Amino acid sequence: MPALILAALSLLASPRLAEAQGSPRAALQKPSAALLKGESVFYASHSLMWYVPEPLRELAAAAGIQGHELVGLQKIGASRTLQHWELPEGENQAKHALEAGKVGAFVMSPIQFPDEGVENFVKLGLKQNPDVRFIVQLSWGGGDTDNQDFPKGSRNNGHREKNPVQLKKLYERNISAGERQADEINRKYGHGKRIMTLVPTAQALVTLRTKIYQKQMPGLNSQSELFVDAAHPSPPLEALNAYLHFAVLYGRSPVGLPMVSVLKKANRADWDEKLNRMLQEIAWQTAVNYPYTGLSPVGRK
């Protein structure tokens, strides 16, 4: 009997132990009440991210997160973050929002790394709000190019059907450059905290395309279905990226939340709940296993 009691106590204690140690399992537990408070978010974005705010609003509402607020969305096509920084003062909504201290999470989407504009916005934001979070999307490259080479080849709408070895190499140089800039900013301004996190959009896309190649994504028969031109995403890729942003912003799994309207409105019978759940699972597993999101055991500080 004592042995049975000890075993039962061990089972009861194990989730808390996992949570205390910051394991991936802890990230799957029901979040604390503190995590349910909504963020006030500003986006300085190019077109591979500026569709994110609306589905993210839907996800926050569906998850019961109270107070999620879109402070603003500054859009410049094919932009470096430095271009957002250099907008004239009268037009620069991003600077004004940070200067007013209205922003809890400031989200950027550079093309190439490093991007001087990222650090400029970090310095400005911290002056007004030492608790502001900086979230940076690692975007895929147009035309299946690495963004370190942008704009070379970015408008080429060529062969998409690549094998896993080719896919793994597609964006790796720019991803590494983004990680180096994140490390530098966190070292200079974080004072031991991770103030800048990365959204692994390019990596999740590689995973999705690999699964399509392996015939593991019912509803998606070719990698070209993820794009409407050389660079821009079709609804399944937009949905995948929205689920990623939700995971990184709120530290919560999107798995099981309702299908976002951008995918639902595509009105394709084979883009169904099964596909939607698989997209959610790819997003969550990519986010929770990537140290730079801050969700993995290695990334938590």
Image: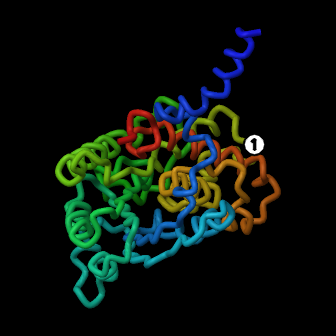
Residue at image location 24% in from the left, 51% down from the top: 190
Q: Nearer the viewer, residue 299 or 16?
A: 16
Bin the neighbour count of mark 1 within 10 Å (Cα to Cα): few under 14, some 14-19, many 20 and up: some
Image check: 48 left or right of 173? right
> Where is residue 147 shown, x and y percent of the image?
33, 51
- Which quadrant holds residue 18? top right
- Which quadrant holds residue 258? bottom right
Image check: 180 left or right of 4? left
Q: By what rule are the colours in the image chosen?
A: rainbow
Q: Is residue 150 above or below residue 264?
A: above
> Where is residue 29 shown, x and y percent of the image?
62, 41
**Image quadrant where one finds the C terminus:** top left
Residue type indicated by callout 1: Pro
Residue at image location 23% in from the left, 85% down from the top: 88
Q: Which residue is mark 1?
A: 218
> Where is residue 228 shown, x and y percent of the image?
58, 62
Q: Is residue 108 above or below residue 128?
A: above
